[in-house]
Image (tube, helix red, strand yellow):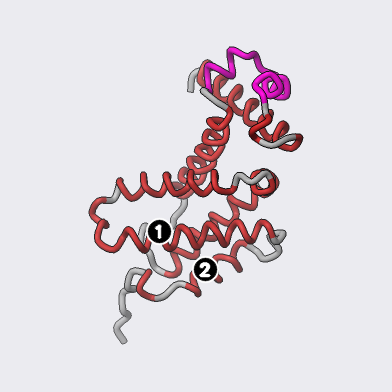
């Protein structure tokens, strides 16, 4: 990665950090660019070079989380099948990712922005669905069900203090889902 790209990523991250600092102090609707750039320690031109509006900062933050999670998933040894075991591993990884951002997610929830998070993930789910046209039959409702249920369980888990481990929560989700949501496991001949 070139220095200019690295520097731009660093500036964007400073702006994200400044955004969350401002969000601690006031609702999203009251955050002003002048306050934000002061908190972030960046020039006004840096803000406008990277973002059209303050909501774009939240979208950028969530995009970075999803991208990072997706990169980690690609490097893991989790097969692409939808067995109970592979789904448990994916859910566990997702709970770990949400837990790592607990403070920021709780701030977003407390400020009434959970619908922004949900909308972002729904849109991201649509992108994933579009990349897999071969799974069009039945994929729609199963995907929506699994996504919606897991998202809301993760949010409730954070709101309740994340007392259970990510593994316990993944077990809960997988054990709650009917067999029809999973790929059939190959039978073992005796």
Give the extent of the magenta segment: 32-51
Residue 61, compared with residue 188, is above or below; it is above
Furthest residue to the front? 29
Instruction: Describe residue 172's horizontal placement relative to residue 143 as left or right.
Output: right
Which residue is at a point 59% across and 66% down the rendered structure image? Answer: 169
Does residue 62 appear in this view?
yes
| Closer to viewer: mark 2 or mark 1 | 1
Instruction: Describe residue 71's horizontal placement relative to residue 99 as left or right.
Output: left
Q: Are marks 2 and 1 in contact (CB under 8 Å)?
A: no
Residue 79, compared with residue 30, is above or below; it is below
Query: Where is the C terminus found, in terms of image quarters?
Result: bottom left
Q: Main secondary structure of the magenta part?
A: helix
Instruction: Describe residue 60's horizontal placement relative to residue 164 as left or right.
Output: left
Q: Specify the label residue 144 is tagged with.
A: 1
Q: Position of residue 180 (x, y in %)?
A: 35, 73
Instruction: Describe residue 70's horizontal placement relative to residue 131 as left or right.
Output: right
Residue 3, compared with residue 120, is above or below; it is above
Which residue is at a point 53% across and 30% down the rendered structure image? Answer: 56
Residue 36 drawn in magenta: yes
Residue on which disc 2 sits:
173
Residue 108, compared with residue 1, is above or below; it is below
- Residue 7 found in image quarter: top right
Classify mark 2: residues with Cα within 10 Å, few (<14), some (14-19) or many (20+).
Answer: many
């Amino acid at each position: 990665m070139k220095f200019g790209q690295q520097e731009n990523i660093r500036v964007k991250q400073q702006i994200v950090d400044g955004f969350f600092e401002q969000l601690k102090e006031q609702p999203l609707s009251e955050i002003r660019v002048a306050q934000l750039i002061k908190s972030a320690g960046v020039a006004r031109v840096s803000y406008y070079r990277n973002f059209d509006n303050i909501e774009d900062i939240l979208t950028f933050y969530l995009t970075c989380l999803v991208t990072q999670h997706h990169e980690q998933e690609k490097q893991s040894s989790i097969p692409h099948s939808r067995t109970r075991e592979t789904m448990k591993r994916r859910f566990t990884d997702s709970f770990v990712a949400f837990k790592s951002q607990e403070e920021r997610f709780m701030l977003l929830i407390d400020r009434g922005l959970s619908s922004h998070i949900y909308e972002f993930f729904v849109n991201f789910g649509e992108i994933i669905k579009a990349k897999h046209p071969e799974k069009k039959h039945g994929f729609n409702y199963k995907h929506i069900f699994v996504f919606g249920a897991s998202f809301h369980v993760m949010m409730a888990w954070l709101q309740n203090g994340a007392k259970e481990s990510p593994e316990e929560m993944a077990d809960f989700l997988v054990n709650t889902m009917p067999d029809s949501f999973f790929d059939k496991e190959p039978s073992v001949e005796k």
